[in-house]
Image (tube, helix red, strand yellow):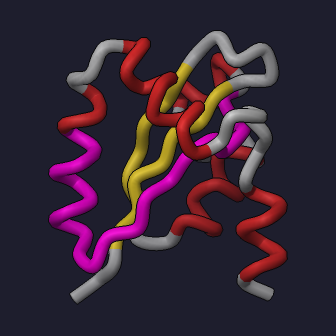
Amino acid sequence: MKIGYVYILSNKNRTVLYIGVTANLIRRIKQHKGATGSVFTKRYNATDLLYFEKFTSIVEAIAREKKLKNWHKDWKWNLINENNPELRDLYPELISRNT
């Protein structure tokens, strides 16, 4: 069974949030950073990876994505701040751990 990831992106000013799901986190974030990930992330320059979760199956990841998308914006920010209080882009760390 395929593993899955749920991730949250934001722009440089931290004014928008984008929640997505993927089986290949590095490739997907690279697409967003290259402006080929989605229309929303391209329009709002949401390319900074602020949060992600790994799941043993893509089905679990999709279920979590649906739950997170129904959360209030404040709850999403609380989740991000608990794990990434500096609101730094986690993508460079993700790349360095996987090379």
The residue at the point 32 percent across, 70 percent down is 55
Q: Position of residue 62 (x, y in %)?
A: 22, 54
* On screen, residue 14 above or below 56: above
Front residue of 8/74: it is 74
Q: Please identify the quarter of the rendering in which residue 67 is found.
A: top left
Q: Position of 83 compared to 23: left or right?
A: right
Residue 57 falls inside the magenta stretch: yes
Q: Position of residue 1 (x, y in %)?
A: 21, 88
The residue at the point 29 percent across, 34 percent down is 68
Q: Which residues are magenta?
A: 46-66
Q: Position of 80 compared to 85: left or right?
A: left
Q: Please identify the quarter of the rendering in which residue 84 is found.
A: top right
Front residue of 37/17: it is 17
* On screen, residue 51 above or below 68: below
Q: Position of 62 compared to 8: left or right?
A: left
Q: Position of residue 60 (x, y in %)?
A: 18, 63
Q: Position of residue 87 (x, y in %)?
A: 73, 33
The residue at the point 83 percent across, 76 percent down is 96
The residue at the point 57 percent across, 59 percent down is 28
- For the C terminus, the quadrant is bottom right
